[in-house]
Amino acid sequence: MATKFLAKINPLNADKIGTSAHGTAEFTIEGDVLDIKIEMFETPANTSHWEHFHGFPDGRDAAVATSAQDVNGDGFVDLPETEAVSGTTMVPFDNAPHEMNIPHDAYPTSDANGHFAYQQHVPLDELRAKFKAVFGTDDLDLDKRVVYIHGVPASLGLPATVAGAVGSYDAHTTLPIAVGKIEAIN
């Protein structure tokens, strides 16, 4: 029998980025496969969108960030500001989630209307092994995680106070644009 999870993804930073990104993320565990389906609407158009689940390695329940997390008062909730309530970036929704390689270019790109759909079948044993190597546990605890969608065009003016650079990727790549709590649905 399959175990299913759903996150309703709602806008974050919408008033600053000019779009209200929203959508859903579905997770189905059946046998040794994790099936991930994400569909997003009204994201910044023609933009690469990093997407991940975030959480706390110690198993605490992660929560979605809100404008209350804008601790420096610059009007943006950036990636570092989400960590207090959402934890750390854990598993990417890219071309190989089980490799848990975060900074690269193999994430979905939205179309001219700001839409994208993502689907991946992930070998659960490989994901759990990598997760254990990185976080010390092989329990994904999906119902204690949150999904973040990131990414705005490089042309969007961001104040110097917006942080979140990862490797050669700047805050335009990592700025959260939408977030949703993962919940068990069966």
Image (tube, rainbow, N blue to C red):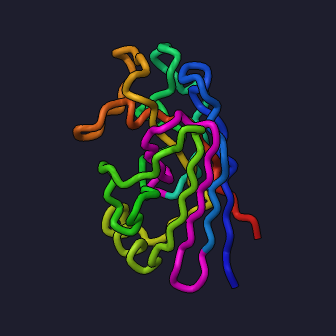
Which stretch appears magenta?
29-58
- Quadrant where the image shows the N terminus: bottom right
Q: Position of residue 24 (x, y in %)?
A: 66, 52
- The residue drawn where x is 56% and y is 49% is 116
- Quadrant where the image shows the C terminus: bottom right
Q: Position of residue 18 (x, y in %)?
A: 58, 23
Q: Nearer the viewer, residue 31 or 95?
A: 95
| 51 drawn magenta | yes
> How many numbered discs sit on the rendered protein?
0
Whether residue 87 is situated above or below residue 162 in the rendered picture: below
Whether residue 7 is situated above or below residue 44 in the rendered picture: below
Q: Nearer the viewer, residue 170 or 85?
A: 170
State the image quarter where residue 14 is shown. Answer: top right
- The residue drawn where x is 61% and y is 20% is 15
Q: Is residue 184 toward the left or the right of residue 116 in the image? A: right
Q: Outermost residue, right direction?
A: 186
| 9 drawn magenta | no
Q: Is residue 114 toward the left or the right of residue 56 in the image? A: right
